[in-house]
Amino acid sequence: MNTQSKPIPNIIREKIKEVEDENDIKLSTIQKILCAIEGPVVTMLDVLYGDVNLFVLDQHMEKADESIAEKLEINVGDEINLREVIIHKYGRPLVYGLSYIPKDRCSDTVIEKLVREDITTGRILLEREIETLTKIENISIEKPDEHLKNLFHTNENLLTREYVLIHKKNVVIWSKEAYPLSYFKE
């Protein structure tokens, strides 16, 4: 056995360290796990805090602009489902989520479930047995816009992460999750 082992490279760990260094902060273990988890954070929140709920703030079909098309690797003008949610516990917002889902890469059944039910995209993928690969694209600290200030009732900076879910080499969901930096410190 080689006694001169090298650390296993981990891009997510390195990105988290970069965020900590750039902002002169130390993220909690739970915050680091929420940044690194592959897929939506709702399962982890449910394990940590018991039943959590999902409230759909907005959901509608729209045409992809240049920015959204680039995120989803689709054409400008393609139809997407925009979905904005808040995961909460007893009405206290825990995590804000924004997702873009290209209509042409989803079955009509999946789109119907998204529109009709307060169900997470992860739960739909699980129910439909759709295997996906998660690729975390960014972890950062951002100033909240007015919408998020109102949702969380704070001006505090937000810890955010952006990721895509890939199925058969195609991006099927782009998501961004955010919550105030003081959350999940325990």
Image (spheres, helix red, strand yellow):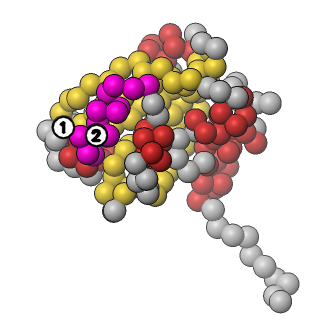
Find the magenta span and give its range: 106-118
Q: Residue 61 carries which label?
A: none
Q: Which residue is drawn at 65% across and 34% down?
A: 45
Foreground of the two, 171 or 18:
171
Q: Three-letter amino acid code at disc 1?
A: Glu
Q: Which residue is drawn at 28% across and 33% down?
A: 112
Q: In this view, does 149 lie above or below 73?
A: above
Residue 43 picture location, percent across and down? 61, 39
Q: Is residue 19 above or below residue 177?
A: below
Residue placed under numbered mark 2 in the picture: 109
Q: Three-letter amino acid code at disc 2?
A: Thr
Q: Nearer the viewer, mark 2 or mark 1?
A: 2
Per the image, is 83 magenta?
no
Q: Which residue is drawn at 23% across and 40% down?
A: 108
Residue placed under numbered mark 1 in the picture: 79
Q: In this view, does 47 lie to the left or right of 140?
A: right
Residue 2 picture location, percent across and down? 81, 88
> From the image, which quarter does the N terminus lie in?
bottom right
Q: Which residue is drawn at 35% across and 32% down?
A: 114
